[in-house]
Amino acid sequence: MSDIYTGRVLGKHEATKVRQQLEKPDPKALEPSQYRPPKQRSLSAGERINPLTGQPELRTFPKSYGCDGGLSQPQFSWLSRDAAEQHIPACAEAGIAVTPYRVLESGLLTGKYRRGQPLPEDSRADDECGWLSEPDEAIYDSIEAFNAEADASGLTAGQYALKWALDQPGLTACVVGVKRIDQIAALMPGCESSD
Amino acid sequence: MSKNNSLTVLITIGLMAATSMLARGDDWPMWRHDAGRTGISNQPKLATPHLQWTRQLLPLTSAFRNPRLQFDAGYEPVVMGTTLVVASSRNDSVTAYSTETGEELWRFYSEGPVRFAPVLWKGRVIFGSDDGQLYCVALDDGTLLWEFQAVPRSRKVLGNRRVISVWPIRGGPVVADNRVYFAAGVWPFEGVFIYALDATTGKKIWLNDRLGFVYGDHPHNAKAFGGLTPQGYLVVNGDELIVPCSAAYPAKLDRRTGETIEFSLPRQTRTPGGYFAALDPTDKRDLRRGKVTLDQLINREEHEDRWRTGATEDGLSRRITLAGTKVNFDDRFAELTSPIHCIIAAAGKTFVVTRGGDLHCYGPSPRSTPKVHVVQPSTASRSAESSSNTGLVQAAGMQDGFALVYGLAEGDLLETLIRQTRLHIIGVDPDRAKIAKLRRRFDHGDYGTRVALLTGNAKQVEIPPYLASLTTTETPGRFKDLDSILDAAELLRPFGGTICLPTDDATHRSIQALLKKGSMGSFSLERLGRFTIVRRSGGLPGATNYTGGWQPSLDTRVRAPLGVLWFDDGLGHFKRSPQPKFIDGLMISYPKNWHLERFKGNNESRLSAVGCGIERHLHRSRPR
């Protein structure tokens, strides 16, 4: 017997009550040859409660999770907010860092896409690389609502997209892709979180 | 200061400087003689050793049981001029003795076990402690010259059964080219810090703190973060700094810049790590290739009941070379019958440390009556155990675990707790002079084993949470405000941890009123005689028992990010034994060989063969 709070191994005179309550293990019972449940057939080593979903799942990678906290990188932006419903709160609860990608939505939230105007040169949508197709009317509706918020904040659209993301609870940092160095400097005012 | 005094000081400084420069060829200034840890000295082996004096030192217990981590299994003396210095992991000190007589010259206490031999360099004694500090004191009188906090803060853990820094200095210091190199931190995810300091001033030259988060393969096909866990004496190999590591092959750093040259996580195909690494000039091929040598006695690993080693030399750590003659620690020395831990040669003498802790000095000429310095027994009397203190022990009702005594006076309560309970006592007080006096009082066997003292107030010392089975004080005025009581309550062990304070009725009522204002949670308050008792009942919120059966744990408390609370290798119960249970703050586990039926075939002979193999190994590499 040992104390879980200090690691101290208890003397024989201690914890006699607990000792008496314990069932003695059957010395003839077979124990598994490895650290996994008895009679387990799969490669997994038992069950765990997934800290993100709260649901039980097979513990297939018992040593790869948990100890260092880890980080999660969901897609998250002013336009794509699904992660805010369960993913980000669960990470905050479990102590897992959240560093979302695509907070500028491949440029949609930088103010360079305007309804009725040709696609800007050298943009993701224009170079047809597959990252972004030409925005449809519904997306332009969203972009215009976003641009109005950005204008009201006094920041550029890109700065506001970044600041909005960083101000959401549970976020640790944002992954932002840029093509040119000067774009980093232009975004910096958005890194000053309201917190 | 008068002119005469000034002159005295100048002369003293002059003498110190002269002594400092006397780093003679027959010194033994660091572990295994030099920065390459060669164990080679020009001093010849004594033809006929004659005992000059003996000093009994209190026996040491190593931090770990693991044979690869026996870096602190016994005393490792170092010598410069006519001063011999030993560090002690038992009483947290470094002590200097005269090589001529064995008389004690001075003693310096740190705030934690000193597990590695100091380096003697230009009249200085440089050593690291489990408290996370590197100290430099004067060789002549033990005066502190500089100290360097190697760690981010004073946070403590219970490490190897002692309250120590989360980042103990376990990378033993080495000095070369006016720089001292050492390492702090043994848990990669808590941070690992390898330093080069100016040995004269203690100023930082470089820091490598990037070896604690190496992502890669771990056993059983798991990928995770891991890193260097420096535990062992650092080695200087030309422009490279070698950092021995507990599990992995030693790391190599650029000695000029601190940049990492080579480090890999441990894996089956690599030579297992261990605390020992050294240059072996007798192996010309290795030397040409700039390789360090490991010892087969240490750098080996038992896996699935099979021993695994790599390119190592057998027994290098158990021998030295004196003027070309090999001296083996396992050979008989003079008339000594007890097993030998180590031998060094310096100042024309040979010093032998036994596994039991005796330090023997041998010279070339006989001495009629060699002096024996015995361990002085405690001078404490039963009178120190006042009825008041006995009443406190009875009221608290705690006999086992750890006790915190915040605020010290004469130390009589500590004495009572030592004599009347089995508690391990940690005394805390900001008064350095008082702490120094009390350390001497208990340094007759109890210091380090039953009681340890830390300097500072509660916030500075940062005791780990949930440690205290009992918290009390020798200065009751210490607990006069709500914060101090709540802070102490946070450190109480769940399932019964108790604060016991001697109070009068008025003080008890004011504590009662204070606690009503605060959130008591699972704490209860009662009056027992003239004592106020605060108990922490039940477990922590969200914590649950776990009774096995491979069921998922419903505990909501243990969540990332996790930090180290305690560590030790006293139990190794986690493989091929019934699943541990966790009940009311206790872990119930079973050893690997919990029943003989585990072994196939002839059970008893197999078990006895394994036991003997380990025993043989222990006999060669650590004290009994």
Image (cartoon, coloured by chain):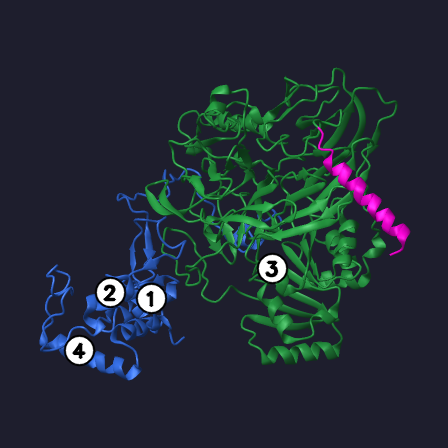
Chain colours: A blue, B green
Residue B30, image x and y in percent?
65, 34
Q: What residue does disc 1 label?
A: A90
**Badges 4 and 3, same chain:** no
Chain designation of label 2: A
Query: Do callouts 3 and 2 mark residues in contact (Cβ within 8 Å)?
Result: no
Disc 1 residue crowd, few under 14, some 14–19, many 20+, Cα 10 Å: some
Query: Three-letter amino acid code at disc 4?
Result: Ser
**Badges 3 and 2, same chain:** no
The boundaries of the magenta stretch are: B1-24
Q: Distance between the residues labelled 1 and 4?
A: 27 Å
Q: Tell me if residue B105 can be seen.
A: no
Q: Which of marks 1 and 4 is nearer the N terminus?
A: 1
Query: Do callouts 1 and 4 mark residues in contact (Cβ within 8 Å)?
Result: no
Question: What secondary structure is marked by label 3?
Answer: loop
In the rendered structure, the answer to whether residue A186 lies left or right of residue B620 reads left
Q: Which residue is drawn at 86% across and 51% down?
A: B6
Classify B133 as above or below A30: below
Q: What residue does disc 3 label?
A: B463
Query: Three-letter amino acid code at disc 3?
Result: Ile
Chain designation of label 1: A
Instruction: Looking at the picture, tell me which residue is in the foreground, A108 or A172.
Output: A108
Q: What residue does disc 4 label?
A: A142
Q: Nearer the viewer, mark 2 or mark 1?
A: 2
